[in-house]
Amino acid sequence: MRFDGRNYDELRKIKITPGYLENAYRSVLVEFGRTRVICTASVEERVPGWLKGSKQGWVSAEYSMIPGATDSRYQREVNKGKLSGRTQEIQRLIGRSLRAVTDLKKMPDITIWIDCDVIQADGGTRTASITGGFLALKMACQGLLSEGKIAEDPIKEHLAAVSAGVVNDRVVLDLPYAEDSAAQVDLNLVMTESGNFVEVQGTGEENTFSRDELNLMLEYGEKGILELIQIQKGALREIVIASKNPGKIKEFKSILEPRGYKVLSIAEFPELEDIEETGSTFKENALIKAKYVGEKTGLTALADDSGLEVDILDKKPGIYSARYAGKDATDEKNNQKLLKELEKISFEDRTARYVCALALYNPEGKKAEIVEETCEGIIINEYRGEGGFGYDPLFFLESLGKTFGEIPLEVKNRISHRGKALEKLKKVLENL
């Protein structure tokens, strides 16, 4: 046993938290024991000058440590006027590793930057950066696919990295600083899911090492990397949205994908029958849909039942919002019927709200969580904006002076009934 109680071939406690930062395009907090690294992905719709006209993209990486990452203050390298040799080596390693599993021709004229910032260092910062950086890259590619900016997923296969070494004449896996600083041999291994090497960095620290020791370090490293890849995959959770509405799916993807979810719609399960919404409330209908989809697919299912309540119409259309103008109603027909019914109603009396009930159903434990949220507004008498769907071009927010059809999706997600309901479910989602 080692000083921290682990077996020689055992990883430290690994934790990966997708969506750690709200403002980043995609982000991941990766923890290898006490080592913690924030990995963010940013997207630029351009490539370095030397790649212009090549019809391919680029993946680049930067690495840094914050001043409080170590026991004594780590001086910011920007104040030194240049990057240290160690930093340059590590960020080149990260970039090389990520490009090895990326088909750059499938992301033409796009650069994805992966920034790895060490907020606490206890050994293995480069391997943690590669492992978390890959997941941030994978999530960024999912986002680009959802947004229609690329046609195919450029990620060829999963990738992770881990350290191994010889300490006190014993081969060990995943060294914290206490072992790393005393190691006779230090080795960093980057490997793909299929078992192919990207990079092997092995150095004897004032010592030599045998072929048998090298083979055992590679064996331990491969075992650790395959475990890390399973943890990566576990962090990218699948969730089925019980809807075929492209507008709803787009909104759910924009909210859930940055948090590490692979979002599916029931359109991808043609064997599912149409769901009869027999409930008398938004909550009842949401639960009916979530349970049906969860049980039939075996995946966690998220269903929403949402609609518009107009006060002067006795809260109609309510649960019938999607089919207000009849069974085969379109958004246009529903909006026209609403405008006709409010034709003689003054602006002050057109108060309304969007309501969203969300039901999350986990078929494994047969557990359900239901939340409900609202967003208050006023129905205006003309279409404004081309964004959103449903009644959005008529739903006016006095605080913004705009309709839901006029505001960007990211703004809508922060203030909408659906966005607020998902925020309530955030902790439940994180614990799935």
Image: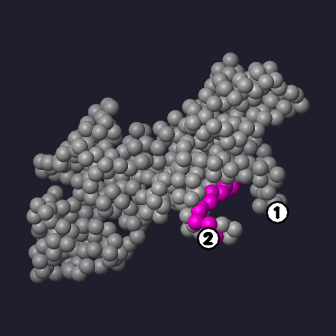
* x and y percentages locating residue 378 in the rendered image: 24, 73
Residue at horizontal 11 percent and vertical 77 percent from the top: 340
Check disc 1: other Cα within 10 Å, few if <14, some if 14-19, many if 20+: few
Question: Secondary structure beneath disc 2?
Answer: loop
Horizontal arrangement in the rendering, residue 66 relative to residue 81 (left or right): left
| Structure colour scheme | one colour
Q: Look at the picture and state if 134 lies above or below 388.
A: above
* x and y percentages locating residue 381 in the rendered image: 20, 80
Residue at horizontal 20 percent and vertical 72 percent from the top: 332
Can you see residue 339? yes
Magenta stretch: includes residue 53:
yes
Q: Look at the picture and state if 37 lies above or below 123.
A: below
Q: Disc 1 designates what residue?
A: 81
Question: Secondary structure beneath disc 1?
Answer: loop
Residue flagged by tag 2: what amino acid is it? Gly
Rendered image quadrant of residue 49: bottom right
Q: Look at the picture and state if 401 lies above or below 13.
A: below
Looking at the rendering, the stretch of residues picked out in magenta corresponds to 52-68
Give the distance between the C-alpha atoms of the residues marked 1 and 2, in whole angstroms. 33 Å
Count of numbered circles in the view: 2
Rendered image quadrant of residue 200: top right
Quadrant for the N terminus, please.
top right
Q: Looking at the picture, tell me which residue is in the foreground, 271 or 365.
A: 271
Residue flagged by tag 1: what amino acid is it? Gly
Q: Disc 2 designates what residue?
A: 53
Residue at horizontal 71 percent and vertical 23 percent from the top: 216
Name the N-terminal-most of marks 1 and 2: 2
Horizontal arrangement in the rendering, residue 303 relative to residue 52 (left or right): left
